[in-house]
Amino acid sequence: MKSRSQAWCVRLAGLWLVLASHPTILHAQTFEQSVVAARKADAQFAVQQAAVLGRRAQANQAGTVFWPYAGVTYNQADLSVGGKTTSILSLTQPLLSYDRYLLLQQSETLMAQADAEERQATNDMVLRVFSVMVEVIKNREAIRANDIQINGLQEQLNRAVRMRSLGQGTVTEVSDFEVQVAVAQANRLNQQNALQTAERNFNLLTGLHADVVAMTVEPAQARQEIRSFEELMAYVRDNAPSVKIARIGLEQAQIASKRTKAQYVPQVSAQVARTQYAGLPSANVSSVAITLSATIGAAQYYDDQKASTEVLRAQENLRYSQETTVSEATRLFVAVRSFNDEIIARQRALDAARQAVTANVKSYQGGVKTNIDVLASYKNLADAEVALVNSRLLQIEAELRLNLLLDRSSAYSVLSDVSTTFNKSVS
């Protein structure tokens, strides 16, 4: 008994080693798991993250403008004509500089831009994960609904064949059912191909194999209620990621415009230098210098005009971003609430379609209805099931997009009267 327990322990340890060494065979079942996996596996997100790191490095570099810096100069003249070798080692500390002050301000906007771009990249990645998971779920549910239709039609086909063999049926009835079964089976093959494509896309995006049966896109949300539609619109207008990026762009354009004029403001710096001439003792020099280096001409005039134009462009871009974001938030807000009513109506339609199938089959067997009625009722049932699934998915997508516009740390529902629960099969 003890040896068996040890053998099972060895097997379990071997299984864990396989799972640890082959993470791609792990299955993702929830939306949150897939998003976490995509952070590491999605190539597009990795490229965007690299750009964010570059932006942060640029911001850190701009933040060092008032740091002291060292300089080394070495000059070796032609010794054949009596030239001498000179070396200068200097340390300079900027003290007063309007241009450097503006560059220091720019470092803050660059860091804020990096944060906003990272948030935007994350939102884009989340939506890509959602889209590929929705494709898996749509095809899964379409196959499930189609299988119900195939099973029902096959049952009626078998009955029609039996009745025909007993001399109570017609060839037409058998042929009609055979055609519809064949069409449904062909549709199932197309749906299976689409499902396999969706699974491959999911694997490329997340590095995980999709658990098709258990997959769900229901996000784990901490629900929070917004008091009014106007409050939600005001919040989105100021805090949506695209609005933040546009506002940061305006701040950068304004700083760039000021820097075109800052070149005409004198700068003050302190310097300590050690100079060594060949054949002479070294000399140490310390000084505080006021410098002004500016070029006045047509190029500088047009640079100033260009900077002013960029400010106007950034202002209009911010206004456009705010208007389009509010418009999108309004559309999503209305959509989430209307989908709630639509789902209720589609659930009633599905219940009616199920009753119609039962009634038409019994009426057909009793000679009251024709096989055409049975075929139509099965098709209506499949269509009703697929339509309900699609409506639920569209509702979840609308709420997810609205949550992302809010740019909060976690996705949560903003409408207390809307349920985003998605069941993997239609109840």
Image: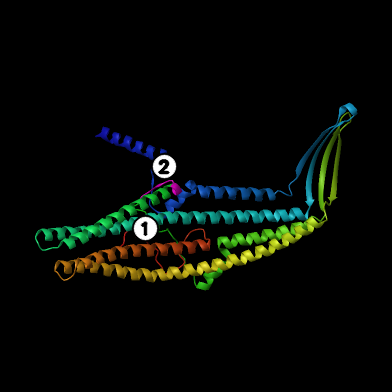
* Extreme residue in the front direction: 171
Residue density around tag 1, few if under 14, some if 14–19, many if 20 or more, within 10 Å: many
Task: Name which residue lies at 55% across and 67% down.
Answer: 324
Residue type at tag 2: Pro
Is residue 197 visible in the rendered structure shown here?
yes
Reading the image, the residue beneath label 1 is 138
| Of 351 and 384, the residue lying toward us | 384
Q: Residue 23: which disc?
A: 2
Q: Disc 1 and disc 2: Cα gap in Å? A: 26 Å
Task: Name which residue lies at 56% across and 70% down.
Answer: 234
Colour scheme shown: rainbow
Image coordinates of residue 352 in percent, x first then y, are: 27, 70
Task: Name which residue lies at 42% across and 62% down.
Answer: 396
Magenta segment: 204-211
Image coordinates of residue 35 in percent, x first then y, are: 45, 52
| Of 29 and 179, the residue lying toward us | 179
**Left or right, 343 with reference to 166:** right
**SS at mark 1 in the image:** helix
Query: Where is 201 relative to 307, above or below?
Result: above
**Left or right, 3 with reference to 399:** left
Residue type at tag 1: Lys
Residue density around tag 2, few if under 14, some if 14–19, many if 20 or more, within 10 Å: few
Image coordinates of residue 81 in percent, x first then y, are: 90, 28
Task: Name which residue lies at 20% across and 69% down.
Answer: 359
Q: Residue 225: which disc?
A: none
Image coordinates of residue 50 in percent, x first then y, are: 57, 47
